[in-house]
């Protein structure tokens, strides 16, 4: 084997178990002190009700969504997160309503969250992980909870009343 072939085929990460690579990526993300990219949906049914999730860590309501997986695109992440957190099926994705980056929004890390309108079918299966999400519920627009996790109430208000204006925070 040539020296070049040895250098090209040397792949130390291939020796690690698949789960360890995910942990290494997560540790590296925190060590590098870079913002995490997330996506959240202002998800509504055809009749206008808004889909929210009750978080397991804070017990407060939130928009469905989450952080991108390594190598994942935004358009794939949002339907995946909605399905995991609510059991609902995305009927269609709409406009971006805002990009939120205030460092104090999330106590866990600095996140940049892209907020998108979405139409969903009613939840069927509910949350897949009850430790992360306690429940998913549809709310009439006039019955939305006042306090929401991670400063998401203003994201929701901007999306529902922003008249097409995109917020860049």
Image (cartoon, grey):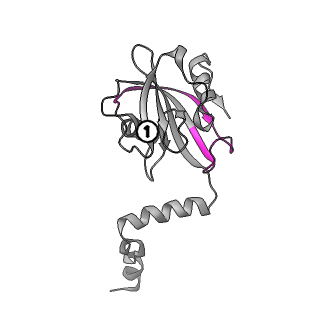
Q: Which quarter shows the C terminus? A: top right
Indicate whether residue 89 is drawn in magenta: yes
Q: Which residue is mark 1?
A: 134
In the picture, measured across the screen, residue 144 lies left or right of residue 100, that is left
**Among the 4 quarters of the image, the one containing residue 158:** top right
Residue 41 at what x, y percent from top left?
Answer: 49, 31
As helix, strand or loop, the secondary structure at mark 1 comes to: strand
Residue 160 at what x, y percent from top left?
Answer: 56, 19
**Among the 4 quarters of the image, the one containing residue 113:** top right
Residue 105 at what x, y percent from top left?
Answer: 65, 41
Q: Residue at x 42, y 34 (%)?
A: 135
**Among the 4 quarters of the image, the one containing residue 166:** top right
- For disc 1, the neighbor class at 10 Å (few under 14, some 14 to 19, many from 20) is many
Indicate whether residue 100 is drawn in magenta: yes
Q: Is residue 36 above or below residue 134?
A: below
Q: Residue at x 55, y 36 (%)?
A: 114
As drawn, the residue found furthest toward the front would be 59
Q: Which quarter shows the N terminus? A: bottom left
> Which residue is nearer to you in this view: 1 or 115?
115
Query: What stretch of residues is rendered in magenta?
Result: 88-113
Please give the count of numbered marks on the rendered protein. Answer: 1
Q: Is residue 71 above or below residue 50?
A: below
> Which residue is nearer to you in this view: 97 or 26?
26
In the picture, measured across the screen, residue 28 lies left or right of residue 93, that is right
Residue 63 at what x, y percent from top left?
Answer: 51, 32
Q: Is residue 51 above or below residue 86?
A: above
> Which residue is nearer to you in this view: 53 or 160?
53
């Amino acid at each position: 084997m040539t020296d070049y072939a040895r250098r090209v085929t040397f792949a130390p990460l291939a020796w690690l178990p698949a789960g360890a690579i995910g942990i290494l990526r997560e540790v590296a993300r925190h060590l590098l002190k870079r913002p995490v990219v997330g996506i959240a949906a202002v998800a509504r049914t055809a009749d206008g009700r808004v889909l929210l999730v009750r978080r397991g860590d804070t017990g407060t309501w939130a928009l469905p969504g989450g952080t991108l997986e390594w190598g994942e695109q935004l358009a794939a992440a949002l339907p995946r997160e909605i399905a995991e957190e609510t059991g609902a099926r995305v009927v269609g994705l709409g406009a971006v309503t805002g990009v939120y980056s205030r460092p104090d929004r999330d106590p866990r890390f600095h996140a940049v969250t892209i907020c998108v309108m979405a139409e969903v079918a009613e939840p069927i299966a509910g949350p897949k992980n009850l430790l992360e999400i306690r429940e998913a519920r549809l709310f009439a627009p006039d019955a939305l909870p006042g306090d929401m996790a991670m400063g998401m109430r203003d994201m929701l208000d901007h999306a529902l009343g922003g008249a097409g204006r995109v917020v860049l925070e």
